[in-house]
Image (cartoon, helix red, strand yellow):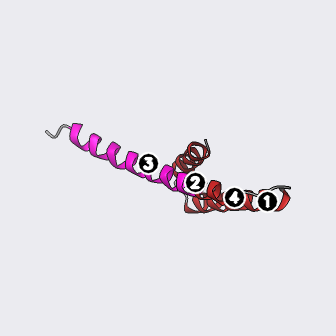
Amino acid sequence: MIILTAAALGISAGQMRSAAVIALVAALIGMTFAVAAITSPGPVSILAFVYAVLGYNAGLMLFVLGLYANTRLHRATRVSH
């Protein structure tokens, strides 16, 4: 579930098309895990953080691949006269 949520964040941040938003969301993921580690009475899994970062990056890559596929499909279906 962490991977899917992080991938959704990556796709959503990519749709903003702003490097500042992409960096801000990445920083917020890290800060959230830092706050969870500080305030948690028990141990915090670093593996969950790694999954979140990988999911976020995968979401960004999926968005970029979707843009690329969309561009290629529009070029292929364009009729030249």
Q: Nearer the viewer, mark 2 or mark 4?
A: 2
Q: Residues within 10 Å of mark 2 (few under 14, many from 20)?
A: some
Label 4 to label 3: alpha-carbon separation? 20 Å
Q: What's the residue type where badge 1 is placed?
A: Val
Q: Earlier in the sequence, mark 3 or mark 1?
A: 1
* Residue 45 screen position, x and y as percent: 69, 56
Whether tag 1 and tag 2 are in contact, CB under 8 A, the answer is: no
Label 1 to label 2: alpha-carbon separation? 17 Å
The answer to whether residue 65 is magenta is yes
Where residue 51 is drawn, which disc sits there? Answer: 2
Q: Earlier in the sequence, mark 1 or mark 4?
A: 4
Residue bearing the label numbered 1: 35
Residue placed most toward the observer, 19 or 45: 45
Q: Nearer the viewer, mark 1 or mark 4?
A: 1
Q: Is residue 80 toward the left or the right of residue 72 in the image? A: left
Q: Residues within 10 Å of mark 1 (few under 14, many from 20)?
A: few
